[in-house]
Image: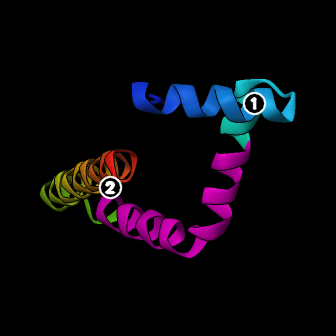
């Protein structure tokens, strides 16, 4: 797992304020993410298993590419919003 450089300072600040390790902050964030997105993650898992069971390598590869593009776009959008908020 990679943590974006722009996220390190806020993670460390929050950890210092809570007198916890930065790893604890990341752990709690991951736990919250999985709890909030359980249904979406289960759907993706089922779709992936279906591609594998059918031997549909092309479908699996296309789904992975589409997801990677979606993740990249969401991260870029989040970073743009964060920078806009800081400069406002």
User: Which segment did they paint magenta?
Assistant: 28-52
- Image disc number at residue 26: none
35 horizontally vs 78: left or right: right
Closer to the chain start, of discs 1 and 2, is: 1
Q: Is residue 74 magenta?
A: no
| Quarter holding residue 63 | bottom left
Residue at the spot of label 1: 15
Measured from the top left, where is residue 1 in percent x and y?
48, 30
Q: Specify few, some or many for label 2: CA neighbours under 10 Å numbering under 14, 14-19, or 20 or more.
A: few
Taking depth in this image into account, of 62 and 20 the one nearest to the observer is 20
Instruction: Identify the residue shown where x is 22% and y is 54%.
Output: 73
- Above or below 10: residue 83: below
Q: Is residue 44 magenta?
A: yes
Measured from the top left, where is residue 21 in percent x and y?
78, 24
Q: Specify few, some or many for label 1: CA neighbours under 10 Å numbering under 14, 14-19, or 20 or more.
A: some
Does dot 2 land on a helix, a strand or a loop?
helix
Instruction: Identify the residue shown where x is 80% and y is 33%.
Output: 17
Taking depth in this image into account, of 12 and 43 the one nearest to the observer is 12
Residue at the spot of label 2: 81
59 horizontally vs 24: left or right: left
- Above or below 56: residue 86: above
27 horizontally vs 5: left or right: right
Measured from the top left, where is residue 37 in percent x and y?
56, 68
């Amino acid at each position: 797992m990679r943590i974006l450089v722009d996220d390190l300072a806020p993670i460390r600040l929050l950890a210092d304020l809570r007198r916890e390790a930065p790893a604890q902050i990341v752990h709690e964030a991951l736990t919250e993410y999985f709890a909030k997105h359980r249904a979406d993650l289960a759907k993706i898992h089922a779709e992936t298993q279906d591609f594998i069971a059918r031997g549909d390598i092309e479908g699996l590869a296309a789904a992975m590419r589409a997801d990677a593009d979606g993740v990249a776009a969401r991260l870029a959008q989040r970073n743009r919003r964060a920078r806009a908020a800081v400069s406002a």
